[in-house]
Image (cartoon, grey):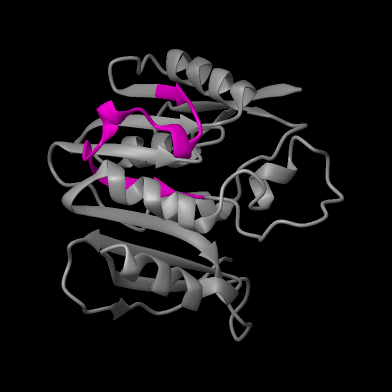
């Protein structure tokens, strides 16, 4: 069942499907992890309901345009209705396409890419089939995600992603070898003193080696 919920920023609203994979606080943390530069052209990879891109646009006046990329047809169509609900057709474009198949017109198009991809490696999935691709790398691997980011980013462009904390070594190595140099890192924990469950990473295409590690973010 679809519901319209407030984004809790101004008068913005978002449409979600209660039977599909709904966004979590990790998406909000990602949207707040980086600030927009003036004239920023942003891509929201694995956009789902569109919460990351919409939240980022709502909190950053410097954003020129946001493009959502979502492989699931139903989620992409729902995102289009969220865009219309907020009268943002001139600021947001929704593309229903796999990241592996992004058209050549988007090559080196973006100054910032935000990504909230499937966290887990593929395997058996007990959840409903329409939820599984949102959680597991069944249709999109980490390598394919980063290949798409490298192709679509301008030189000097930023790539921000939220992922599983226990895959941080793999994430850092995979970005580095593609010329997406890690620049900022922040773990997310559920409670003070608990081990982190997620990590936020900011990388720059063509950046020089140097990583700023921020204090752990407590998801209270």
Q: Is residue 87 visible?
A: yes
172 versus 37 height, above or below: below
Q: Residue at x 36, y 56 (%)?
A: 160
Decide if residue 120 is on the left or right side of residue 155: right
Name the quadrant of the C terminus: bottom right
Q: Residue at x 52, y 15 (%)?
A: 81
Q: Viewer-proximal residue, 6 or 163?
A: 163
Q: Residue at x 78, y 32 (%)?
A: 19
Horizontal and vertical percent position of residue 49: 56, 32
Horizontal and vertical percent position of residue 25: 56, 53
Horizontal and vertical percent position of residue 17: 69, 28
Q: Viewer-proximal residue, 176 or 212?
A: 176
* Quarter of image, res 57: top left
In this view, which residue lies farthest toward the bottom? 193
**Segment tinted magenta in the rendering:** 94-116
Name the quadrant of the N terminus: top right
- Is 79 inside the magenta-drawn segment? no
97 versus 151 height, above or below: above
- Is 112 inside the magenta-drawn segment? yes
3 versus 218 height, above or below: above
Q: Is residue 8 visible?
A: no
Decide if residue 172 is on the left or right side of residue 178: right
Q: Viewer-proximal residue, 109 or 29?
A: 109
In this view, which residue lies farthest toward the right? 126
80 versus 137 height, above or below: above
Decide if residue 144 is on the left or right side of residue 206: right
Horizontal and vertical percent position of residue 144: 47, 50
């Amino acid at each position: 069942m679809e519901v319209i919920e407030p984004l809790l920023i101004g008068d913005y609203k978002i449409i979600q499907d209660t039977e599909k994979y709904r966004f979590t606080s990790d998406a909000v943390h990602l949207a707040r992890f980086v600030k927009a530069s003036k004239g920023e052209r942003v891509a929201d990879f694995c956009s789902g309901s569109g919460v990351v891109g919409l939240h980022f646009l709502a909190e950053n006046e410097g954003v020129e345009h946001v493009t959502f990329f979502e492989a699931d047809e139903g989620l992409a169509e729902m995102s289009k209705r969220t865009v219309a609900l907020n009268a943002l057709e001139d600021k947001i474009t929704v593309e229903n396409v796999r990241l592996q198949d992004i058209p050549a017109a988007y090559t080196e198009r973006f100054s910032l890419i935000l990504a909230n991809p499937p966290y887990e490696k593929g395997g058996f999935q007990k959840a409903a089939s329409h939820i599984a691709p949102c959680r597991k790398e069944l249709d999109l691997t980490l390598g394919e995600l980063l290949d798409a980011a490298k192709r679509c980013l301008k030189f000097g462009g930023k790539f921000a992603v939220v992922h599983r904390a226990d895959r941080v070594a793999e994430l850092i190595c995979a970005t580095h070898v593609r010329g997406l140099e890690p620049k900022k890192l922040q773990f997310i924990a559920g409670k003070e003193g608990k081990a982190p469950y997620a990590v936020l990473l900011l990388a720059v295409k063509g950046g020089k080696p140097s990583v700023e590690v921020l204090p752990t973010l407590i998801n209270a």
